[in-house]
C-alpha cells in the first residue's frame, strides 16, 4: 500500500514514515526534517511533524501577555487531604466486601461505581504528585505517592514518575514518550474490535508498553514502593481473616478504572486527535458563535492535527482537573486547583482550541468512528529530554539515538525556572 502525504496549510506534516524527496526540498527552508525510524515491521501511518511541541511556545506567549500566571505555580496543601479521604474510602469498601462473592452484583457494582472512580482519582493523584505539587519537599511527594498507591493493589507510583515527566518533556517523541502507541499496536488494533479491545484493556497497555520502549534505573524509591505495597496487601488480607476478596476488589477497581469507565475517557481524550470527526470537538469560541442557520466548516479542516485536547466537563471534579490538559501541559508547575484560574486569565489562548465535551463520547467515537483510531497520534523523530536516566536503546522499532533523546535529567521533576524557557 503506497504512502500518502497529507495536504494541509502546514508544510511540516505527513502520514507515513516513507520518504518524499519533493516535500523535503520544500521543507528545508522552513524546518529541520529528521526522518523517523524506518525499522518498524509494519507501514507507519502516524502523523509525523517536524516542528517543536506547541506547549512551550504557547507558555512563552501566555507569560508575555499575562505574567501574573507564574504566581499560580506552587504546591497545593489540599491534595494530601483528598488522597487520605479516597484511600480511606477504598480500604473501607474492601473491608466491607470481605465476605461478599466476587461474582455478586453488589461486589461488581461497588467495584465499578465506587472502586473504579476512586482508583482513577488515585491514578491522577499520583500524576499530580509526580510534578511535586503536593508538598514543598520532593521526598514528601514521593511518600504521599506511595501512600496513594495502596488501594491500586500493585506498586506503580515510583515507576510512573520518570515515564510521565519524560512524556511532558518529550511530547510525541518516538522512543521517549511511552504514551504513544507503537506501530505494531496500531496495526493490530486498527479495527472496530481492535479498538474495543484497546479501550477495554487500555490500563494494561499503559502498564506494559513502557517496558518495551526503555527502562529507567531501579532506585530505592522503587524498592520502597514495592515493599510498602506488598506489606499492605498482605496486611489487608490477614486483617480480613485471610479473605482474598478485599485484595481482588482493589485489583478489579484498578482494572475497571482504566477500562470502559467514563473517567477512563481521559486517556484517549488527551492526545489522540479527532480532526476528521465533524462534531464533538468544537472549541469554546466556536460553541459561543455557533449558528443554527448554516453549518460552519470544522475549525480543524485546514489545520494540522492538534496534539492535546482539553475537556471542561463535570468529571474534572473527580479527576484533579486533568481535563484541562492543554493548560496542564503548558504549565506543569500549576496545581490542579489553580488550572481553572489559568484558563480564565488566558482565555484568549484556550477558548479557540478544540476541546472535548464528553469523555463517554470520546470512548464511543474512538471505537465506532472509522476516522479515529490508534494511528491518530502526532509523532516527532527528534527532540525531548529523558527524565531519570535509563538506557537509550529503544525497543519495538522505537529506537532512541543520543541526538534525539537530548540530555538526560534527574528525577527532581519540572522546575519553575523552566517556565521562562
Image (cartoon, rainbow, N blue to C red):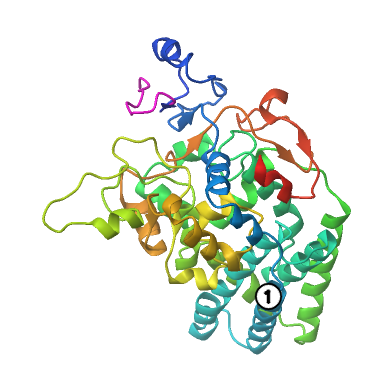
Picture residue at 48% right of the left edge, 29% below the top:
49
Percent position (x, y) of residue 62? 53, 48
Percent position (x, y) of residue 410? 81, 43
Total marks placed: 1
Majority secondary structure of magenta residues: loop
> In which quadrant of the rendered view does residue 187 lie?
top left
Picture residue at 40% right of the left edge, 41% below the top:
190
Q: Is residue 414 visible?
A: no
Percent position (x, y) of residue 198? 47, 52
Q: Is residue 349 above or below residue 256?
A: above
Picture residue at 47% right of the left edge, 14% below the top:
29
Residue situated furthest right in the rendering: 220
> Does residue 176 show up magenta in the picture?
no
Q: Is residue 196 visible?
A: yes
Picture residue at 59% right of the left edge, 34% below the top:
173
Q: Which residue is mark 1?
A: 78
Percent position (x, y) of residue 5? 36, 23
Q: Is residue 225 above or below residue 249?
A: above
> Which of these two is toward me, 64 or 3?
64
Q: In the drawing, does residue 17 fall left or right of residue 102? A: left
What is the quadrant of the N terminus in the image?
Answer: top left
Residue situated furthest left in the rendering: 293
Q: Is residue 390 above or below residue 319?
A: above
Estimate how packed mark 1 is, as few (under 14), some (14 to 19) or many (20 or more) residues with alpha carbons within 10 Å: few
> Which of these two is toward me, 193 or 410?
410
Q: In the drawing, does residue 27 fall left or right of residue 166? A: left
> Does residue 6 show up magenta in the picture?
yes
What is the quadrant of the C terminus in the image?
Answer: top right
Magenta stretch, residue numbers: 1-12
> In which quadrant of the rendered view does residue 230 lie?
bottom right
Q: Secondary structure at mark 1?
A: helix
Amino acid at each position: 500500500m503506497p504512502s500518502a502525504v497529507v495536504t494541509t496549510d502546514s508544510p511540516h506534516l505527513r502520514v507515513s514514515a516513507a520518504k518524499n524527496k519533493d516535500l523535503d526540498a520544500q521543507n528545508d527552508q522552513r524546518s529541520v526534517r529528521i526522518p523517523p525510524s524506518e525499522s518498524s515491521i509494519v507501514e507507519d501511518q502516524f502523523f509525523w511533524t517536524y516542528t517543536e511541541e506547541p506547549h512551550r511556545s504557547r507558555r512563552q506567549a501566555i507569560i508575555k501577555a499575562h505574567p501574573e500566571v507564574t504566581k499560580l505555580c506552587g504546591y497545593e496543601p489540599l491534595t494530601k487531604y483528598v488522597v487520605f479521604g479516597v484511600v480511606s474510602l477504598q480500604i473501607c469498601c474492601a473491608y466491607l466486601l470481605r465476605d461478599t462473592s466476587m461474582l455478586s452484583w453488589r461486589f461488581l457494582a461497588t467495584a465499578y461505581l465506587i472502586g473504579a472512580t476512586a482508583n482513577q482519582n488515585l491514578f491522577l493523584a499520583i500524576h499530580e504528585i509526580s510534578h511535586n505539587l503536593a508538598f514543598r519537599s520532593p521526598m514528601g511527594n514521593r511518600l504521599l505517592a506511595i501512600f496513594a498507591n495502596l488501594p491500586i493493589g500493585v506498586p506503580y507510583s515510583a515507576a510512573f514518575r520518570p515515564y510521565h515527566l519524560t512524556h511532558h518533556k518529550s511530547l510525541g517523541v518516538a522512543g521517549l514518550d511511552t504514551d504513544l502507541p507503537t506501530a505494531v499496536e496500531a496495526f493490530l488494533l486498527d479495527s472496530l474490535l481492535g479498538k474495543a479491545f484497546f479501550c477495554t484493556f487500555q490500563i494494561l497497555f499503559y502498564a506494559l508498553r513502557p517496558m518495551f520502549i526503555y527502562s529507567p534505573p531501579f532506585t530505592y524509591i522503587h524498592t520502597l514502593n514495592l515493599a510498602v505495597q506488598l506489606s499492605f496487601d498482605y496486611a489487608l488480607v490477614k486483617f480480613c481473616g485471610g479473605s482474598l476478596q478485599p485484595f481482588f476488589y482493589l485489583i478489579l477497581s484498578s482494572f475497571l478504572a482504566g477500562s470502559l469507565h467514563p473517567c477512563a475517557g481521559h486517556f484517549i481524550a488527551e492526545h489522540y486527535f479527532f480532526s476528521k470527526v465533524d462534531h464533538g470537538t468544537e472549541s469554546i469560541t466556536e460553541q459561543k458563535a455557533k449558528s443554527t442557520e448554516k453549518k460552519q466548516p470544522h475549525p480543524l479542516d485546514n489545520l494540522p492535527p492538534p496534539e492535546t485536547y482539553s475537556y471542561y466537563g463535570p468529571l474534572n471534579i473527580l479527576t484533579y482537573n486533568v481535563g484541562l490538559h492543554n493548560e496542564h501541559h503548558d504549565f506543569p508547575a500549576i496545581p490542579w486547583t489553580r488550572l481553572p484560574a489559568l484558563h480564565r486569565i488566558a482565555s484568549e489562548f484556550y477558548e479557540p482550541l478544540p476541546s472535548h465535551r464528553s469523555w463517554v463520547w470520546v470512548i464511543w467515537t474512538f471505537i465506532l468512528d472509522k476516522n479515529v483510531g490508534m494511528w491518530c497520534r502526532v509523532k516527532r523523530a527528534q527532540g525531548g529530554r529523558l527524565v531519570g536516566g535509563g538506557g537509550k536503546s529503544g525497543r519495538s522499532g522505537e529506537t532512541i539515538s543520543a541526538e534525539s533523546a537530548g540530555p538526560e535529567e534527574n528525577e527532581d521533576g519540572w522546575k519553575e525556572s523552566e517556565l521562562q524557557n
